[in-house]
Image (tube, rainbow, N blue to C red):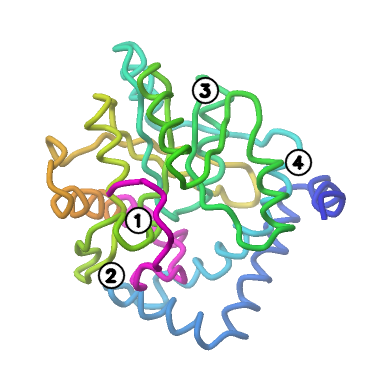
Amino acid sequence: MKDFFRLLALLPLPVLHAAGAALGWLSFLASPAYRRRFLANAAQADYRFAQVRTAVSEAGKLIAESPRLWFGRPVTIQWDGAELISAARAQGRGIVFLTPHLGCFEITAQAYAARFGPITVLYRPARKPWLRELVDTVRSRPNLDSVPTTLSGVRQMLKALKAGEAVGLLPDQVPPEGLGAWAPLFGRPAYTMTLSTRLAAQTGATVLLAWGERLRGGRGYRVHLRSWSRGEVATDAVGAAAQVNAEMEALIRECPQQYLWGYARYKQPRTESKTGISA
């Protein structure tokens, strides 16, 4: 599988994105469950299908671009708001990056690592062995460490923040039961992780919002940075989760055409064995 991905990585990004767009529409048309969830989630945020139909192809591009990002040559990256990173680093503080399922979230950590230095990102290990091995191999690169959603992974993130480094999370990923809180997202309760705000509270780190815009025609990506705009991070789990969701809503509304509307954001959290991670 790695050899196949390396072969795909040789293709130009415009070709991969064109193939991905076709894949996105094929998935949308072939899966009634996926299509219903996509439409329901968009409607929950008051978007008509005509307003977000581009997101169908963007979801496919997310899959097709992975080989290039993991194994291929560096891609063109533009920056919007990089001065926020420089300001946080000048204070000697760690940075907690919060990135929703918007655009190319893979590129945000890669871009930071290439330009600014070490970053540790939290990821959920794939359930299929072949995919887990692939992801574990390609997601660790110079200045970029990937840690699993375990107590050990959280400890590594705390260590990085205390050393003044950066960490990255997908805060709109549904955590296991007991590791989050219910808070509204586009007016509907969504189970939301509170780990990100706890990391910031425990280390005094700066919280920044980031998302990677996929530029048209395969011309590369633009990383957008935004400040946390909700004042002091709430100390209670529900309040913190509500703040995070409000920040995510604002980012998504910047470019709803690249949000992953088919993601099961409102699902019930799954039950897992205890990891020692607290919400």
Examine the rendered structure and indicate whether residue 116 appears above or below residue 276: above
> Circle 2 is placed at which residue position?
45
> Circle 3 is placed at which residue position?
118
Which region of the structure is painted magenta?
Answer: 251-279
Q: Camera-side residue: 125 or 183? A: 125
Q: Is residue 229 magenta?
A: no
Marks 3 & 4, CB-CB < 8 Å contact? no
Q: Percent position (x, y) of residue 214?
A: 54, 49
Q: Percent position (x, y) of residue 67?
A: 73, 49
> Circle 1 is placed at which residue position?
252
Name the residue located 31 percent from the left edge and 18 percent from the top edge.
93
Disc 2/disc 3 C-alpha distance (Å): 35 Å
> Circle 4 is placed at which residue position?
71
Name the residue located 47 percent from the left edge and 47 percent from the top edge.
149
Disc 3/disc 1 C-alpha distance (Å): 27 Å
Between marks 1 and 4 in the image, the one whose residue lies nearer the viewer: 4
Dot 4: element: helix
Neighbours of disc 4 within 10 Å: few (<14), some (14-19), many (20+): some
